Image (cartoon, rainbow, N blue to C red):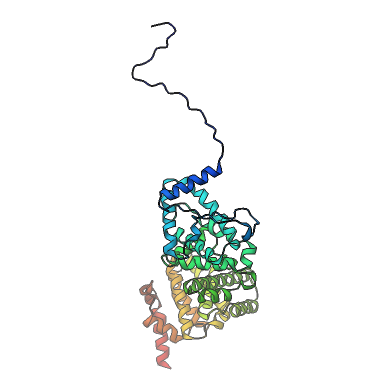
């Protein structure tokens, strides 16, 4: 072997380092290649559109649309679904493309005013089916957040789009699934923002979606508003009681909120009891101190409870609230008969209500224990009734 020759191992290959090869950008060649791929795949490849991309242009200036546009199909789910399924297949193989899809969707949705009505409907169907088919990695905020542009909302374009989106999605999915998407997009508390400002009311919401056949969405929104009003009332009462406000002031606040929110009396009774008992300073395991605190609270606020316990049904509801609280809180378990006796002494609970609960009460939680503990008081009531 010559001294200048390098030794080698038999059967091995010497790899040469690859160098970066610079290629000039050629949009025309790329476009031709995309079209060729489309043709080779018998039309399976989806191209959203080949028209206007420059912001601020108008429809007449956008030029001719690409002949292989997704938006050229019929505005029906059976026509749009194959496109969604194909995109899903592509993303499973090339998940890095999800960002490209996000960008395309965002630009489309921010430019809805430049689309025709049926084109917006196709986009709504595509978006709904994308989530229905669980299109890999597409975040809800990509679809919903770009819609909240003032000019789009003001023209009613967004409301029409989101209505088509809801209707399409709920064909295959539950309302809970839809709410889950809205929560992920941080939109579940902002549904009225899809409406023009002049129609941004609960009444307009109910009227619109009832007309569109989305009663379950209307019921969800009404329930949400109702729960929010209950929460606000409870918060206001908690503050007033903590500040030891005058009872007349508390009563005025309750009446005003009940009237404004049109709250049913049965809910008012529940809230009043929860707020009053939450304000009690419980002392832990000292039964006597707990009993004294609870009874003092009942005596102090009996007039407030009396204002809304105006029927046997409402009195019974209050008694069930007492039962549940004592059942769920171990330190109050033995206070049940004392609280019932205090409510009776303050004329909040009538004798008939207590006897009905004792004989025919339907809530089973802790019932056996409470019936037994209340038996001496019930016997006293029955004896007094016989004497009369």
- Specify the quadrant that holds the C terminus: bottom left
Residue displayed at 60% across by 53% down: 53
Name the foreground residue: 250 vs 296: 250
Residue 236 location, x and y as percent?
61, 70
Q: Quadrant of residue 243?
A: bottom right
Q: Is residue 379 visible?
A: yes
Residue 54 location, x and y as percent?
62, 53
Q: Relative to 355, does residue 85 appear above or below in the rendering?
A: above
Residue 222 location, x and y as percent?
52, 73
Name the foreground residue: 107 vs 186: 107
Q: Tell whether 42 sits left or right of 277.
A: left
Q: Relative to 90, does residue 269 appear above or below in the rendering?
A: below
Name the foreground residue: 80 vs 293: 80
Residue 374 location, x and y as percent?
40, 78
Q: Is residue 292 visible?
A: no
Residue displayed at 60% across by 77% down: 257
Q: Residue furthest bottom?
A: 388
- Specify the quadrant that holds the N terminus: top left
Q: Residue furthest left?
A: 11
Q: Relative to 25, does residue 84 appear above or below in the rendering?
A: below
């Amino acid at each position: 072997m010559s001294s200048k020759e390098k030794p080698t191992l038999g059967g091995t290959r010497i790899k040469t380092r690859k160098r970066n090869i610079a290629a000039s950008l050629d949009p025309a060649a790329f476009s031709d290649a995309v079209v060729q791929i489309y043709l080779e795949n018998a039309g399976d490849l989806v191209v959203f559109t080949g028209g206007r991309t420059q912001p601020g242009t108008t429809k007449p200036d956008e030029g001719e649309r690409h002949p292989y546009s997704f938006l050229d199909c019929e505005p029906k789910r059976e026509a749009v679904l194959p496109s969604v399924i194909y995109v899903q297949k592509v993303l499973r193989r090339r998940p890095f493309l999800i960002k490209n899809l996000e960008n395309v969707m965002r630009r489309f949705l921010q430019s809805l005013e430049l689309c025709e009505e049926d084109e917006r409907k196709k986009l709504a169907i595509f978006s709904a089916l994308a989530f229905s088919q669980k299109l890999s990695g597409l975040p809800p905020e990509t679809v919903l957040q770009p819609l909240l542009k003032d000019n789009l909302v003001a023209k009613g374009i967004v409301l029409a789009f989101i209505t088509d989106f809801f209707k399409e999605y709920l064909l295959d999915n539950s309302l809970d699934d839809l709410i889950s998407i809205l929560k992920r997009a941080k939109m579940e508390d902002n549904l009225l923002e899809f409406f023009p400002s002049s129609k941004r009311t609960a009444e307009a919401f109910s009227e619109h979606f009832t007309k569109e056949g989305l009663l379950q969405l209307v019921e969800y929104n009404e329930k949400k508003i109702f729960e929010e009003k209950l929460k606000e009332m409870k918060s206001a009462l908690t503050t007033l009681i903590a500040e030891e406000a005058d009872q007349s002031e508390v009563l005025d606040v309750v009446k005003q909120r009940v009237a404004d929110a049109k709250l049913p009396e049965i809910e008012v009774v529940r809230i009043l009891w929860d707020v009053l008992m939450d304000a009690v300073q419980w002392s832990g395991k000292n039964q006597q101190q707990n009993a004294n605190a609870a009874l003092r609270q009942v005596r102090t606020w009996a007039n407030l409870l009396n204002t809304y316990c105006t029927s046997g049904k409402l009195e019974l509801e209050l008694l069930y609230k007492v039962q549940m609280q004592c059942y769920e809180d171990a330190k109050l378990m033995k206070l049940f008969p004392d609280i019932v006796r205090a409510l009776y002494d303050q004329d909040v609970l009538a004798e008939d209500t207590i006897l009905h609960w004792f004989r025919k009460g339907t809530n089973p939680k802790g019932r056996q224990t409470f019936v037994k503990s209340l038996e001496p008081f019930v016997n006293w009531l029955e004896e007094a009734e016989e004497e009369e």
